[in-house]
Image (tube, rainbow, N blue to C red):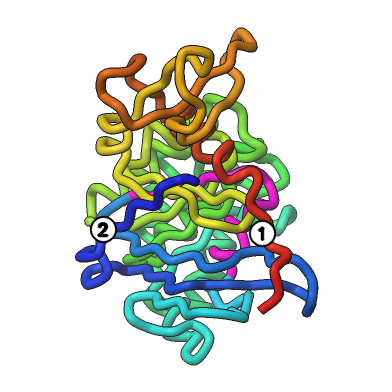
Amino acid sequence: MAEIWVEKDAMERSPLRVDHFGRRYRRNRPWAVRDVSLAVPEGSITALVGPNGAGKSTVIRACLGFEQPDEGRIFVSGVDPRRHRAAAVNSIGYVPQAASLYRNLTIGDHLDFARAARPSFDRPYALARIRASGLSGERRIADLSGGEQAQVALALALGTRAPLLLLDEPLASLDPLARRDFLTTLVDDVRGRGATAVLTSHIVTDVEQACDRLVVLAAGRLVLDAAVAVAKKEYRTASANELDRQSAIGTFAGPAGESLALVRDRWVGRPASLEEIVLGHLAAGRPRTLTEAV
């Protein structure tokens, strides 16, 4: 069974706290997410990683009040979005997987709409981020590439100056260079003003350059919550054929098809990469089922 690490003292200073959150869409059906608890440390950039269908988007949508918990609670800056959605959302800058932009309007039009909808929206700051990406407010959305549209969506979120940024698979459709540009902009903003960000992805290499914390979901369950630096120090990879399988956290196929094992034994194997740490925990969580009844 995978080991779950949670820093208990982080609960007191967390802009986002999830307590035993569970969600399913029909009674007597499998749970989409169950018993997820985590506290995102202030000032961190957290990668919420897992395969498609692991429940990442369900957690993010619940933070925004789009999903209602069937179990547990969520607190955004100390506010329950189920009870006080407007107050919770005002603390969040959100970037969805598919940028919600109007093709026939300009970037400047979108900045104006954002300011009208949210009086605290910092239009000059958002426009500065747009220009730093090599764009101008006069450009039409229809004339932008996918990467450029992602930069616009990010600038709109950053312009809220919200203390918490939630980014739901924003890199999924971007090419490698566009992903790098997006993450560079995100890191500059978060580090520059001490904000907190949660970035979901199913590809570890996409988020490794930016994130200092790793949360892994597998089949709707939390299987790892750790600082990236700590995880890299604690975990090692070894040949599964040379180990007692019971001592392995999880076994998975290596790049050449070899059987590898993730372990926490400093005398075995070599330091694990972040991708191997995720794969080992996903493999450990694979047999788990969510079909049990309430």
User: Front-most of 1 and 135?
Assistant: 1
Gap in angstroms between the C-alphas marked 1 and 2: 35 Å
What is the secondary structure assignment of the residue under circle 1? loop
Residue 211 percent coordinates (x, y): 36, 41
Of all residues shown, which one is farthest toward the bottom?
Answer: 83
- Read off the residue under disc 1: 100
Depth check: 8 or 89 in front?
8
Task: Say whether disc 1 or disc 2 marks the residue closer to the N-terminus.
Answer: 2
Magenta-tinted stretch? 45-61
User: How many callouts does the rendering have?
Assistant: 2
Q: Is residue 118 magenta?
A: no
Q: Residue at x 38, y 70 (%)?
A: 17
* Res 206 visible: no
Q: Residue at x 46, y 45 (%)?
A: 2
The secondary structure type at the circle numbered 2 is loop
Residue 79 in the image, given as x and y percentages of width and height:
38, 83
Three-letter amino acid code at disc 2? Answer: Glu
Residue at 33% over, 76% down: 77
Residue 52 falls inside the magenta stretch = yes
Name the quadrant containing residue 203: top right
Residue furthest to the top in view is: 256
Q: Quadrant of the C terminus?
A: bottom right
Mark 1 packing: few (<14 Cα in 10 Å), some, or many (20+)?
few
Residue at 43% from the left image edge and 17% from the top image edge: 238
Dot 2 alpha-carbon crowd within 10 angstroms: few under 14, some 14 to 19, many 20 or more: few
Which of 98 and 251 lies nearest the eye of the viewer? 251
Q: Which residue is mark 2?
A: 7
Q: Is 242 left or right of 257, judged from the image as shown?
A: left
Residue 35, percent from left and from top: 52, 68
Say if mark 1 contacts mark 2, CB within 8 Å.
no
